[in-house]
Image (cartoon, rainbow, N blue to C red):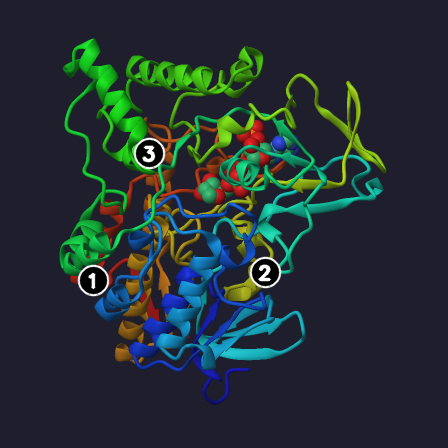
Amino acid sequence: MGSGEPDVDVLVIGAGITGIYQLYEAREAGFSAVLLEAGDGVGGTWFWNRYPGARFDSESYTYGYLFSRELFEEWEWTEHFAGQPEIERYLNHVVDRFDLRRDIRLGSRVAAATYDDGRWTVRTTAGDAIETRFLVAATGVLSVPFLPDVPNRDAFSGTQLHTGLWPAEPVELAGKRVAIVGTGSSGVQLVPAILDEVASLTVYQRTANWCTPLNNSPITAEEQARLRADFAEIKQILDTSLAGFLHPPGDRKTADDPPDERQAFYEEMWARPGFGKIVSHYLDLTFDEDANAQWCEFVAAKIRAIVHDPEVAAQLIPDDHRFGEKRPPFVTGYFEAFNDPKVSLVDLKKTPILSLTEDGIETVEGVRELDVIVWATGFDFGTGALARIDLRGRDGRALSEAWRDGPTTYLGLQTAGFPNFFFPGGPHAAAGNNPRYNGDQVDFVTDLMVAARDRGAAAVEVTAESEDAWTAMIDRAARRPPSFTEKSYYFGTNVPGKPRKYLLNAAGRPKLLELFAASKADDYRPFRFSAK
Ligand code: NA7
């Protein structure tokens, strides 16, 4: 190793929304680039999560790319919150529109990557090796499905599926007795989507979630025209907003409205699309316990009004966390589904799963016979994908070793001791609408690679001091409201044995943008450029 030029300047891992953009940006910056993708198609999250009902809960036009006005104008999303098939079509369109496919190798899973002397040698599970100057892991935060350790998993003779690994070929659910384990964003989307076709549906719920309506609708021709005309303004708002949404921020606190106006405001929020009901809510919603409790009571009353059986309604109302303490799911017809006699709810806190049997799921109440079990049990969030690659930086140090107690990063995109290695969209980055801050990171990573090239430096690496400062700030900020709490998988809580470390960017997107700008203005002082 180390002699001659590497095979490529930039190797990107993962053809999700971040990786596709990174490939585009690397090429625009004049780098030779290749992208390795484990799946048989592009789309990342939107390739793998093809379960019925999978869809955006950010507005489609705020989630898609903004780097090309032509792309924005020519692609017509059909719904304010597009479904998975349309999203997958969009990402394929982008790849073709910008001629990216020639540099994408599908079915190519990266097993290992080793740094030495200003370059990375990347090895695939098929045994191929590629040398690259820069390595960008756009491997995502929700890309490694988590399966709970249930006794006798293999004893079940029916079909088992995970929402995050849904097969490309149609899954026969018609007339089947189906169980869904897990009631996070995926589970609650799936329930109403398959209700009509199945013979019975049993929902295994460990924790009830604060679900509120998505309020999706088709985009009218008039709205399409307005979106096109407003591109510059939309981009400006999205590029400067706190969390990457178009929704206007709230402007008053709960107590500023008298009780009757407050009820009217809550109704207005309930009718808002998607994250509008958080972004545009009372300012103290997630800061003030009493303000939060009042909204929770409003949502609970809605659930009681929708669900006919009071006992079932009570089970569907969270009793162990505030609104916003965990990532709130958005739903279409979820609570209504429980009025269908073929749907039943099992409370896993009262009746935990004991094991699988040949015929179904066994709890203390006996065996429920099933044909299909869907695990909607989430992901090894944040670090899962990187942990599964044998990454070795300077002196052969393994990333898994460096991150034994949780990730340490600078701006959620690089870690000391791993030169020329970047992970936009990874741990310590997430701050709202994913593609917006991931895109910010890709822009910065590309600038940094260009800066290294311009200086004739073979290696660029964040200093330990910069990394320590950012990581300490994340850990500190994670303890302050209105952050998610340790009940959230954002702390790794759902995966046994995982360090309890905050995996989002608790400082938010403005801080990220501020430090990108400061770093550039300061000649990239948080980084060290070197000959190897
Ligand atoms: P989530 O939000 O992590 O939800 C996973 C669900 O699975 C949740 O209800 C969990 O209950 C449940 N779960 C997890 N482990 C178990 C075990 N061991 N037994 C029973 N139930 C379990 O994943 P999703 O796929 O729904 O959503 C992921 C993201 O996609 C979401 O945040 C959005 O960004 C889109 P728990 O609440 O932990 O008690």
Count of numbered badges drawn on the protein: 3
Q: Residue at x 55, y 37 (%)?
A: 187
**Quadrant in which the C terminus is drawn:** bottom left
Image side of residue 164 versus residue 473, left or right: right
Residue under numbered circle 1: 520
How many angstroms separate mark 2 from mark 3 (CA)? 29 Å
Of marks 2 and 1, the one in the foreground? 2
Screen quadrant of the N terminus = bottom right
> Would you call the spot at circle 3 few (<14 residues within 10 Å), some (14-19), or many (20 or more)?
some
Given residues 202 and 495, the one toward you in this image is 202
Q: Which amino acid is tagged 1?
A: Lys
What percent of the width, then of the height, locates residue 77? Answer: 34, 57
Residue 384 in view, yes or no: yes
Q: Which residue is mark 3?
A: 477
- The yes-or-no answer for disc 1 within 8 Å of ligand 1 is no
Image: 112 above or below 4: above
Q: Residue at x 34, y 78 (%)?
A: 27
In depth, the one of 429 and 113 nearer the eye is 429
**Amino acid tagged 2:** Ile
